[in-house]
Amino acid sequence: MPPPTIHTYRSGESALFVNSYLVEGEDGVVSIDAPMFVSDARAYRARLDALHKPLAGVLLTHPHPDHYNGLTELVAGLDAPILALPEVDH
């Protein structure tokens, strides 16, 4: 099995240059966090869609809006689990 490919999405200055990651495996993709602004989240989702693989899940790493605000845009119309630490999931 080949190692996963990690695609980095870096938000612009207004979103604090925060990174989100798409970890692409053979059968699907896992998102690590989601961008803050709708425009960035839509661009991030477009990158996911361009991979032509299902979103296997989303991991939210910590409770800062610049890592979870765009989650709704990312998962719209998809059935993917969202995993978060208890301090994020409140």
Image: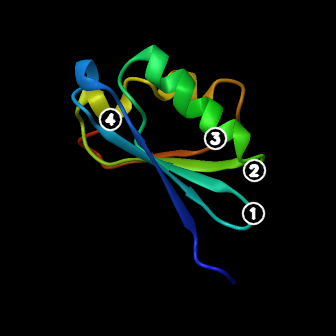
Q: Earlier in the sequence, mark 3 or mark 2?
A: 3
Mark 3, other Cα within 10 Å: few <14 / some 14–19 / many ≥20: many
Where residue 48 sits in the image (x, y, percent)? 64, 41
Q: Is residue 90 visible?
A: no
Please tell me whether mark 3 or mark 4 is closer to you in this view: 3
Residue wearing tag 2: 53
From the viewer's side, name the closer residue of 35 and 87. 35
- Label 3 to label 4, Cα distance in Å? 16 Å
Q: Amino acid at mark 3?
A: Leu
Q: Judge whether 73 appears above or below 55 on screen.
A: above
Q: Amino acid at mark 4?
A: His
Please tell me whether mark 3 or mark 1 is closer to you in this view: 3
The disc label shown at residue 48, or none: 3
Q: Earlier in the sequence, mark 3 or mark 4?
A: 3
**In the rendered view of the protein, which quadrant contains the C terminus?**
top left
Residue wearing tag 1: 27
Where residue 65 sits in the image (x, y, percent)? 27, 26
Q: Earlier in the sequence, mark 1 or mark 2?
A: 1
Q: Amino acid at mark 2?
A: Lys
Q: Amino acid at mark 1?
A: Asp
